[in-house]
Amino acid sequence: MNKYDYLIVGAGLFGSVFAYEANKKGKKCLVIDKRNHIAGNIYTENIENINVHKYGAHIFHTSNKEIWKYINQFAEFNRYTNSPIARYKDEVYNMPFNMNTFNRMWGVFTPDEAKEKIEEELKETNIDEPKNLEEQAIKLVGKTIYEKLVKGYTEKQWGKRATELPSFIIKRLPVRFTYDNNYFNDLYQGIPIGGYTQIIEKMLEGIDIRLNCDFFENKKELENIAKKIIFTGPIDAFYNYCFGELEYRSIRFETEVLDKCNYQGNAVVNYTDYEIPYTRIIEHKHFEFGIQSKTVISREYSDKWIRKKEPYYPINNEKNNNLYERYKKLADKDNKVIFGGRLGEYKYYDMDKVIKQALNLAERELNG
């Protein structure tokens, strides 16, 4: 006998949105998570009255009005604008690359002067069709900016030389010829006042939850507890790595409380020279314009992924994408298990896209 309509493996954003929608339709759900808390990677923990983003900075941004209205049911958002700073040795630059960056780097003032400088540096390289990330970055922003602000950070982030990385990775990086430090172009942007965890708490209200519950350790009991399984963990792990492991990058965090009110003056500072081992420092209070007497910072270290570590970023090169397709063919034949989210679909998703995917699944499953 199935006790539940849906077993949802993972209490992150994807699983929680689906559980919320299913619960509204009168479906009985059990949500499990191997961690000791809900909210997955958007989990925020209150430390010294500061909402600490435990698994890295999460800034909600979208141009989809419906998704913005949807998420605002669960929390009030502030007007936070993502404007990271890049630090190279003793120099500081605005991100994303914009006229403030170009002025600081080259002393130029107009878009035409900046474009001319990039073109001048590009001519010296003979790059026509970029074959790797290094060539793509130089084509986008010139050699000087690449060497100071892209090369070291990217090589730390991915654990590979920029010449070994595919060019498409850098194409997500905004380059603007305006004096605008807003990282995102989206219409709606902000941080939930009081942190993200409250959003998931509201979504999962009235739904059965089991924490510290590893699906694989309890598989015998869990696989027949519900009519269907929504699985948001790694798809290759579900199939016991039968075709081999998909590759990821992991992250290690060093978080500390400092007895001062302001450590770096910005929520996010990227460290772009290779000699500094961490990729960035997050000062969490700045996400909510905090005036607390203490502050909390987290240093982020990009890390090689192995099975016992948390997988953060799928490495979507040709080899891994082909391997994922083999797993997806297995999944497509499975009538009981549905895979979703960043790990289930082996794809990097922003939060608004995660919500959209979960809502699309709910529409197909619950109204089909």
Image: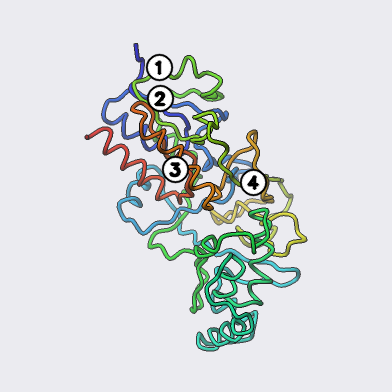
Q: CA distance from mark 3 to mark 1?
A: 28 Å
Q: Which mark is residue 325?
A: 3
The kind of secondary structure element at disc 1 is loop
Q: Which residue is mark 4?
A: 251
Q: CA distance from mark 4 to mark 1?
A: 33 Å
Q: Nearer the viewer, residue 95 or 309?
A: 309
Q: Nearer the viewer, mark 3 or mark 4?
A: 3
Left/right placement of residue 201 relative to residue 260 reads left
Q: Please say if the residues under marks 3 and 1 sit with CB atoms less than 8 Å apart.
A: no
Q: CA distance from mark 2 to mark 1?
A: 7 Å
Q: Position of residue 285 (x, y in %)?
A: 60, 52
Q: Which residue is mark 2?
A: 7
Q: Nearer the viewer, residue 146 or 258?
A: 146
Q: Which mark is residue 193?
A: none
Residue displayed at 64% across by 63% down: 162
Residue 297 visible: no
Looking at the rendering, in which quadrant would you find the C terminus?
A: top left
